[in-house]
Amino acid sequence: MQSINAFWMGNGFNHRKPLAAASRRSSVEGSYLASLQQIHREFEQALQQDHPEPWWQRFIERHSFILLRSYFACLPKLNLAIGQSKIPDFLLVTYQQTLEILEIKSPSTPVMRCDKSRNNYYWSTHINKAIAQISSYEENAHRNTASLHRYLREHYNLEISSNSISGIILVGYSAKSQKEQQEFDRQCSTLTNIRFLTYEQLLTALRQHIFIFENFL
């Protein structure tokens, strides 16, 4: 929803306005709050359904303001290679002017598998592929750092001050046991420049934003 994304980026949120504009501001903010609540309902309902990855990619693109609470810019399907198809779901620009690659998996994608014979857990095939994919994206981004930074400056007016780049995998994950959670944490600790973000964390952040907007703004 372009209007709410624009509102979040500063066209009305957290800006003090003259008293003469108070009624207009209230109308805009009321519309913004109603949109937030509608998106929250849509988000909750979607998590109860079996949408594929492309659906979630479109959902995040439509409502990128959910990510923009932590990032300055959210750029979909940006080519990170020259003459090759190395295109992640999203390239995120942090407020520290560094880059993060977001790879989206559907909420139903399995994250951990259990080896019952050895009583331990390991990454699912889907997650292993996502980790390898992000590593490939990072390698291409580092290889083409100069051209990538120039492209972001010329096409998006974004200045990137660091060669640092890391990856995020969006998943729908909830450990079924303490043992599984411990193994998940252990496996995560072995990854370099890759971390996990869950849909539940995004939904919780959206709820908190609505609560703050309703009660304190």
Image (cartoon, rainbow, N blue to C red):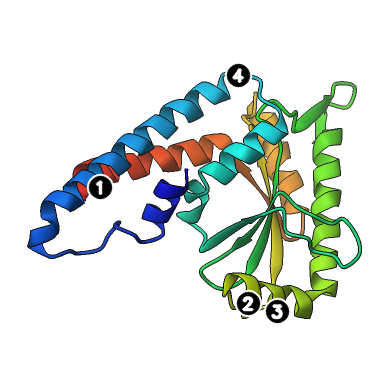
In front of the other: 208 or 25:
25
Residue 37, label in figure: none
Q: CA distance from mark 3 to mark 4?
A: 41 Å
Q: Is residue 121 visible?
A: yes
Q: CA distance from mark 3 to mark 2?
A: 5 Å
Q: Dividing the picture into quarters, in which one does residue 60 lie?
A: top right
> Can you give x and y, in whole percent of width and height, for residue 145 in the image?
77, 76
In this figure, which residue is indicated by the disc labeled 3? 150
Q: Is residue 203 left or right of residue 127?
A: left
In this figure, which residue is indicated by the disc labeled 4? 49
Q: CA distance from mark 2 to mark 1?
A: 32 Å
In front of the other: 103 or 89:
89
Q: Earlier in the sequence, mark 2 or mark 4?
A: 4
Question: Amino acid under label 1?
Answer: Val
Q: CA distance from mark 3 to mark 1?
A: 36 Å
Please name the residue shown 36% across and 61% down the image. 10
Label 4 vs label 1, nearer the camera: 1
Q: At numbered mark 1, what does the secondary structure look like: helix, strand or loop?
A: helix
In this figure, which residue is indicated by the disc labeled 2? 153
Neighbor class of circle 1 (other Cα within 10 Å; few <14, some 14-19, many 20+) is some
In this figure, which residue is indicated by the disc labeled 1? 28
Question: Amino acid under label 2?
Answer: Arg
Q: CA distance from mark 2 to mark 4?
A: 39 Å
> Can you give x and y, in whole percent of width and height, for residue 201 in the image?
51, 40
Q: Dividing the picture into quarters, in which one does residue 162 lie?
A: bottom right
Neighbor class of circle 3 (other Cα within 10 Å; few <14, some 14-19, many 20+) is some
Neighbor class of circle 2 (other Cα within 10 Å; few <14, some 14-19, many 20+) is few
Please name the residue shown 65% across and 32% down the image. 55
Question: Amino acid under label 3?
Answer: Arg
> Can you give x and y, in whole percent of width and height, for residue 93 in the image?
59, 65
Q: Earlier in the sequence, mark 2 or mark 1?
A: 1
